[in-house]
Image (cartoon, rainbow, N blue to C red):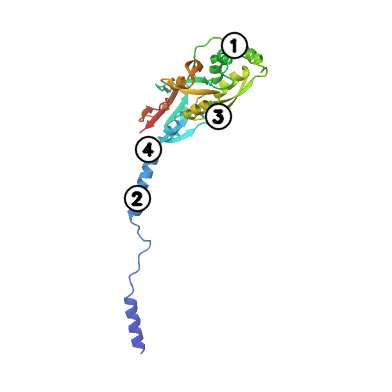
Amino acid sequence: MRCVLIVLLLFIVSCQPDPTPFPVSIPATLIDTPSAQAATTDTVLSVRYALAANTAGAVPDLELIAASGQVEQLTEPVNPADLGTRYDIIAAYGDLADGERSPVVPHVSLILNTDFPPFDDSVLATTLQQALDTRAIVITLAIPGVSADESDSADVLGLRTELANMGLPDGIEINAASGYAPGIEAVRMTLRVAGIDTYWGVLAPELVQSAMRSGRVQVALVMWTESRAVWETLAGEGNIIDLFSVPISYLAVDGLTITFTPYGFPLATR
């Protein structure tokens, strides 16, 4: 009986499958998948883009730029040493040392909404235009390369007098909108000196137009490049106050192909 049991055990052991060696070898296709390769390639080729602090809240083409690479908004002054280490391209309003200027130069204008109070009063609208000091606005901007549009000497006292004659000796308060144009603070300060306090909102240019048509804003700060026709159609030639033009410049590493957005910001591809 004992011999039969031993023979039976030997038969069971001989029928077991061979043990799998450890560790198990994983097929390379499960590690180096096409999707993993694509992700690695995208990471390597993605353009690292930095926008200077003076562009904050004032880049109409931001979505277009973000679609071309990784974008960082700087809060400190541009450091040229970051080019090639942290960033592949750095763009700014104004002139950068050793930078290239964009061939597209944006212009900034203030649009008066004369279809609604208070600037439906033609005297007040005209007086406001005479009170704006474009040179003071440019000085406040402190952006290298900005050019003020030609204007006569500002008549700030005349606007304050006109407001007093209208029964508003303490000035007025109005709603203003910016279509991602630079210079909100400089314009706000200039208007305040003239007796006009402004409350600003930042909107896409097409939303600025609808806000003016509805009377929700009384003035708008807008930016245009080749033509300001859309604003002339909206507000009328006489209600556009041209303030300044502001160049865009950039630093870029070698080997990039540079094109430009409608508002003049550089776009880079490898």
SS class, disc 4 = helix
SS class, disc 1 = loop
Q: What is the distance, in whole Å, between disc 2 and disc 4 at their CAs? A: 19 Å
Tag on residue 155?
1
Q: What is the distance, in whole Å, between disc 3 and disc 1 at their CAs? A: 27 Å
Q: What is the distance, in whole Å, between disc 3 and disc 2 at their CAs? A: 48 Å
Residue at 52% in and 20% down: 110
Tag on residue 45?
4
Q: Which residue is mark 3?
A: 201
Where the C terminus falls, by quadrant?
top left
Q: Amino acid at mark 3?
A: Gly
Disc nearest the viewer among 2 and 1: 1
Q: Residues within 10 Å of mark 4 (few under 14, many from 20)?
A: few
Picture layout, residue 187 above or below residue 83:
above
Where residue 201 appears, as percent x and y from the top left, is: 55, 29
Disc nearest the viewer among 3 and 2: 3
Residue at 38% in and 41% down: 42
Question: Is residue 97 at least partly visible in the picture?
Answer: no
Q: What is the distance, in whole Å, between disc 1 and disc 4 at their CAs? A: 55 Å
Question: Is residue 13 at least partly visible in the picture?
Answer: yes
Tag on residue 18?
none
Total numbered labels placed on residues in the image:
4
Q: What is the distance, in whole Å, between disc 2 and disc 1 at their CAs? A: 70 Å
